[in-house]
Structure formats: structure tokens, C-alpha cells
Image: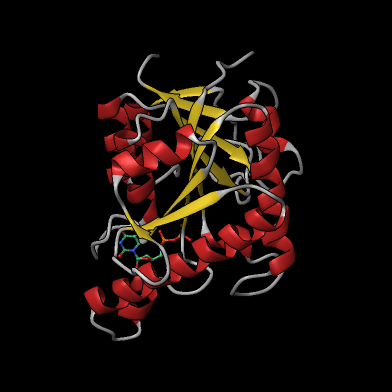
Amino acid sequence: MTRPSFHRILLKLSGEALMGDSAFGINPETVARMAAEVKAAKEQGHEICLVIGGGNIFRGMAGAAAGMDRAQADYMGMLATVMNALAMQNALEQIGVETRVQSAIKMDQVCEPVIRRRAERHLAKGRIVIFAAGVGSPYFTTDSGAALRAAEMKCDALFKGTSVDGVYDADPKKVAGATRYETVTFNQVLASDLKVMDASAVALCRDSNIPIVVFNIREPGNLAKVLAGEGTATVVQNKE
Ligand code: UDP
């Protein structure tokens, strides 16, 4: 089945996508590989917004489970996403792709604050905009940040790069014979609690009518392929 091709996309990568084989942190070789994927996609003519998680460095929930105040731990998680954004900015610029980082927590010496109209100008000039620090508030995740930025930047789709090639009716890493959906509705994802993104992010995409394309980012060349409407992926959308 051929999928539609989308012009302006928001690509969401989890922090773990930058980790490589390490147990945590940023692996420069892996970041360089991700940057090359993004560059290839850009060269196909797409406008790209990027959101990267922070789970490879710090997750608020883990801090809270270890006895920290949840909000305090979440702010640490947001700072982790800024580090990942800077790592990706560095990797992209080393291969000649112009970028700007905009953070939902102001950090004037490091990057720009989130200013939607300015982000629009960056895209018009062919730059990639990397949105950091999620929505800028604790008790949220970068999935929600990705859905929010996709909505305000009027992206045609939210591309969620994961380590599996789509959405399955059960965890394919645990259940043999789990089947992959080619398309699935937002409501089915929410009702069956299918693991796509946080429920709040899924609901925001549903209400803004922004399809979520779930695909495997670990397979080399896959982002460009899926963007061209080829390869394996699942599209979460409103229509049946
Ligand atoms: N976070 C937050 N608000 C946001 C985005 C992120 O509090 O809007 C914190 C939260 O603690 C989260 C951490 O930052 O656990 C890292 O983000 P996330 O878990 O979404 O990263 P990913 O799983 O995508 O690597």
C-alpha cells in the first residue's frame, strides 16, 4: 500500500535513539548517523521540525521513583532534552545542514526561546528547527511537546521514529504472532491502549487531525524511504 507523502513534518526521536549500544548518554557516532538520516530526508525537499526526548540521560519518573520531587526531576529531564538538541544541532551542522534550537525553557546563551513565527522563518530559509525542553512544564513528556509543536507549526504529519516498524496489536518483542497495523485510528489506539505515544499526545494529534507515522529509525535510510511513502510503517489517523 502506498502512503501519502507529507511536506512539512515533525520528527520525534526518543533520547534512546542517540544512545547507540551504550546503556545511557549520547553516542556521537549514533548522533551522526541520525543526523545523516535527517539530512537525507531534508534533501528530498521536506521541511523538518525535530523534537528529541531525554530518556537517554534523565527521566523525571525515574527520579520520582527514587524519592525525588516529581516536578524537580521533570525539570532535570527537560534540561536533558536540551543537551540532546545541542548534540543533534552539532551533528547536523557538521554535515552542512543549517539548524536552530528553540527551547521551551529560556536559555539565552545557549539557544533561542520558542517563538513560532521565528521558527516559521527558519523553515522558510531551509533550516531545521529543533524544539527542546518539551512543553516547558513538568508532568508532561516530549511526546506531548512533539504533538504541540506539530500542531502549532501546522505540520502535515508527526513522524515517530522507534525501534519497531509500526504499531502492533501486542508487543512484537514479547508476543509471537503480533500483527502490525497498516493504518489504525486515534480512537482505537486510545481505547486499546496501544503503545504509540502518550495518550495526551495522541489526543492532541487526533483533535488537530495530524497523522502519526510510526516507523523504525534504526534501519538505515528508512526515514527518507517512509517519507517517500514507501517502506514499512503504521499511520495513525482519524479516518478508518
Ligand atoms: N519532561 C517534562 N516536560 C516536558 C518534556 C519532558 O517534564 O514537556 C521531562 C520528563 O521528566 C521526561 C524527561 O523530560 O521524563 C525526558 O523526556 P521523555 O521521557 O519524553 O524522553 P524520551 O522518552 O522521548 O527519551
Q: Position of residue 156 (x, y in %)?
A: 43, 25
Question: Based on the displayed image, in which of its 4 quarters is residue 239 positioned?
Answer: top left
Question: Based on the displayed image, in which of its 4 quarters is residue 199 positioned?
Answer: top left
- The picture quadrant for ligand 1 comes to bottom left
Please say whether residue 192 is visible from this viewpoint: no
Residue sitting at x 52%, y 65% = 86
The answer to whether residue 181 is left or right of residue 118 is right
Q: Position of residue 143 (x, y in %)?
A: 38, 49
The answer to whether residue 97 is left or right of residue 48 is right
Q: Indicate whether 217 appears above or below 209.
A: below
Q: Indicate whether 206 appears above or below 27.
A: above
Residue sitting at x 29%, y 86% = 67
Q: Nearer the viewer, residue 168 or 102?
A: 102
Residue sitting at x 64%, y 55% = 93
Q: Position of residue 144 (x, y in %)?
A: 32, 48
Q: Nearer the viewer, residue 77 or 167?
A: 77
Q: Nearer the viewer, residue 118 or 192?
A: 118
Screen quadrant of the C terminus: top left
The answer to whether residue 230 is left or right of residue 143 is right
Please say whether residue 176 is visible from this viewpoint: yes
Q: Position of residue 118 (x, y in %)?
A: 34, 43
| Most distant residue in the bottom direction | 67
Screen quadrant of the N terminus: top right
